[in-house]
Amino acid sequence: MSRLNLDDFSDLIERPDSGMRRDAEERRERLAVPPGALGRLDELGEWLSAAQASVPVKAIEQPRVVLFAGDHGVAELGVSGRESGSAHELVRATLEGASPVAVLARRMGVPVRVVDAGLDCDPELLPDEVVRHRVRRGSGRIDIEDAMTIEETEAAVRLGMAIADEEADSGTDLVVLGDLSVGGTTPASTLIAALCGTDASVVTGRGGASIDDLAWMRKCAAIRDALRRARPVLGDQLELLAAVGGADLAATTGFLLQSAVRRMPVILDGVVSAACALVGQRAAFRAPDWWLAGQVTGEPAQTKALDRMALNPLLDHGVTVGEGTGALLALPLVQASAALAAELPERTEPVESETD
């Protein structure tokens, strides 16, 4: 098998149907509710029409939460509020319905799929349908070593592509994308700093576990050191993901790119999915047209990445828990926009009198 070249996605990904978007805008002008009265919901409805190539827009009938899981060796440095190698506990809580995203998904009737790309735990601790895709056990300490080999990176990207194909083939019409990771915001921030050409201090946040000042300084130093390793390989997305990413981040990148190929819209969650999206944009500049930013997390790296991709977050509720929670909260807004665009009646024009 020849080596995967992410730049090839640039030729495979088309923009959402601009003609359909114009038709949706014209239809919106004819609705009884005045144009602009629904604010951002109008924009979302028109975006969905273009993505679906359908006017009126179709309801979101089969959304799905997809979470890529992994542990990151850099967590050994104390850069996370959670213990290194404990991401499997996040997975277990989600599977048992005891995490925020699981509670919300259950209430909304949205199925959740967890994919183990690089957890650092015995496979017997989790169901086979979760662990059977694992590329490697944990990722390397990116401040001093590569996260994984180039072969593992390619395998992880292909894993994400395969999951996207499975979802598209099963009828999933919108994906809520998130991660279940420990230490994941450190490689994510490194990727964003490298791709945006900025320093570690500009992108280092507190993470979903809200670290203290000392942990923040350790995290900033780790990102600084990882950046030194990232900059020489900026020209090759696979090399970059291998050097300072992780199996879950590489899988998420592959998932995002293949979802765009399959014309399947995705709602991004936090800084991890934003980092993967930014790598995807570097490979295929049209790909972000298929993604929505679900929420603002307060992570400075996420803000930089979304600005670079011109993605305007739907919500700002101060949700920092991660795990796809904020993106899932944005789903009802997207569904509401589709319902309003499809079901609101058009204006009844007054009939002119024949005697006029």
Image (spheres, rainbow, N blue to C red):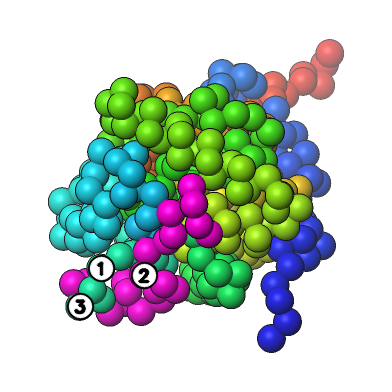
* CA distance separating discs 3 and 1: 8 Å
**Which sits in the foreground, 39 or 8?**
8
- Range of the magenta residues? 125-146
For badge 1, the amino acid type reads Cys
Instruction: Say whether residue 268 is left or right of residue 206.
Output: right
Asked if marks 1 and 2 touch (Cβ < 8 Å), the reply is yes
Based on the picture, tell me whether residue 139 belongs to the magenta stretch: yes
Rendered residue at 45%/40% (across/down): 222
* CA distance separating discs 1 and 2: 7 Å
For badge 2, the amino acid type reads Arg
Rendered residue at 41%/72% (across/down): 136
Based on the picture, tell me whether residue 127 belongs to the magenta stretch: yes
- Toward which corner of the image does residue 158 lie, by quadrant? bottom right
Check the image and report above or below for 319 versus 120.
Answer: above
> In the rendered view of the protein, which quadrant contains the N terminus?
bottom right
Task: Tell me if residue 323 can be seen.
Answer: no
Q: Which residue is mark 2?
A: 137
Could you tell me which secondary element the residue under label 2 belongs to? Answer: loop
> In the rendered view of the protein, which quadrant contains the C terminus?
top right
